[in-house]
Amino acid sequence: MPRGDGKTTLLLSGAVCLASGAVMAAFLSWLPDVGDLRVRNPMTTRYVQIYVNRKTRAGHRPVTSMRWMPIGEMSPHLVNAVLIAEDDRFFRHHGIDWRELKKALKAGLRGERVRGASTISQQVARNLFLTPRKSYGRKLKEILIARHLERTLGKERVLEIYLNIAEWGEGVFGAEAASRAYYEKGASSLTPEEAVGLAAALPSPYERNPLMEADERLAKLRALYLERLLRRAGGASPAFSNPGMSLKSVEGPLP
C-alpha cells in the first residue's frame, strides 16, 4: 500500500473516532441526571404539571393528591397486580420489551387494536421527563431514558417510583392517593380484588377507575387479572409478600 494511502486511512480512522466520541459526549450530556433519584422521592412529575396547567387554563382550581409510600409497605397484592397488568416481563427485560414492541408494531400494521407496549421503566421516563405527545422523537428519548433509569437506579427503585407517581384519575397520582380516593384505606391494606381494580385502571384511569361501573370488557379484564394474581400466589398470598423480600421473587411466566 502506498505510504500516502496509509496516512489517509489513519487520518480517517482518527476522524471517525473523534466523531464517535463527540456523539457519545453529546448523548451523555443530553440524558437527564437521575442519580439523585436513588434517595430522592419525586413529589411531582411532568404529568402533574400538565394536569395543573390544564385545569388552570380552564378556569378551575387544580387539586392534586400524591402521597409517597415505600414499596415494602404497599400491599403485595397491588405490586403483583400492577406487574401483571402493566409489564409482566419487567424483570426479564432491560427497560425495553422488544418482544412486546414487535407484537404491537405488527398488530398496528395489520390495522388491529394496538395494546400499549411501553414498559414500566418507559412510563417512569415519560412521567418524569417527557410529555404525552406522541412522536418518533419522543419515543426514542423515552427508550434512552428508560435504559438510563434502570442502569442507574435498578429495577426495584424504578418500580417503587412508578407505583408512587402513576396517574390514577382526576388529580390522583400514586398508589397511596388512589387507594384512599377509591377505597378509603391505605395502599398497605388492599385486598386482591381492590388491587386488581386499581391495576386494571392504569391504561385509562379516567374511564376505568374503580368507582365507575365496569363494562363487559373491563369486567373480563379484571377477572383475568384476579385469576392470574391468585394463581401466581398459589391461591393464598402473592409471591411478593414480605417487605424484606427481593422483588425478583415475582419473576417468572404467567400461569
Image (spheres, rainbow, N blue to C red):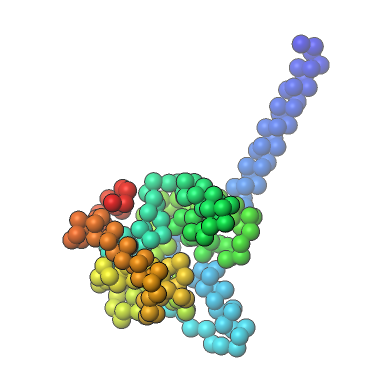
Q: Quadrant of residue 24?
A: top right
Q: Quadrant of residue 141?
A: bottom right
Task: Out of 188 and 96, give the one closest to the viewer.
Answer: 96
Task: Out of 34 and 189, give the one closest to the viewer.
Answer: 189
Which residue extends farthest top?
A: 1
Picture mark count: 0
Q: Residue at horizontal 48%, vertical 83%?
A: 63
Q: Quadrant of residue 181?
A: bottom left
Task: Out of 234 and 71, give the one closest to the viewer.
Answer: 234
Residue 31: x and y in percent read 58, 52
Q: Residue at horizontal 52%, vertical 60%?
A: 113
In this picture, is 50 found above or below 234?
Answer: below
26 relative position to 188: left or right: right
215 relative position to 192: left or right: right
Residue 143: x and y in percent read 54, 51
Residue 208 visible from this viewpoint? yes
Residue 163: x and y in percent read 39, 65
Task: Out of 97 and 44, give the one closest to the viewer.
Answer: 97
Q: Residue at horizontal 56%, vertical 53%?
A: 110
Which residue extends farthest left?
A: 236
Residue 188: x and y in percent read 27, 70
In this picture, is 182 found above or below 113?
Answer: below
Q: Residue at horizontal 71%, vertical 28%?
A: 14
Residue 66 visible from this viewpoint? no
41 relative position to 114: left or right: left
Q: Quadrant of the N terminus?
A: top right
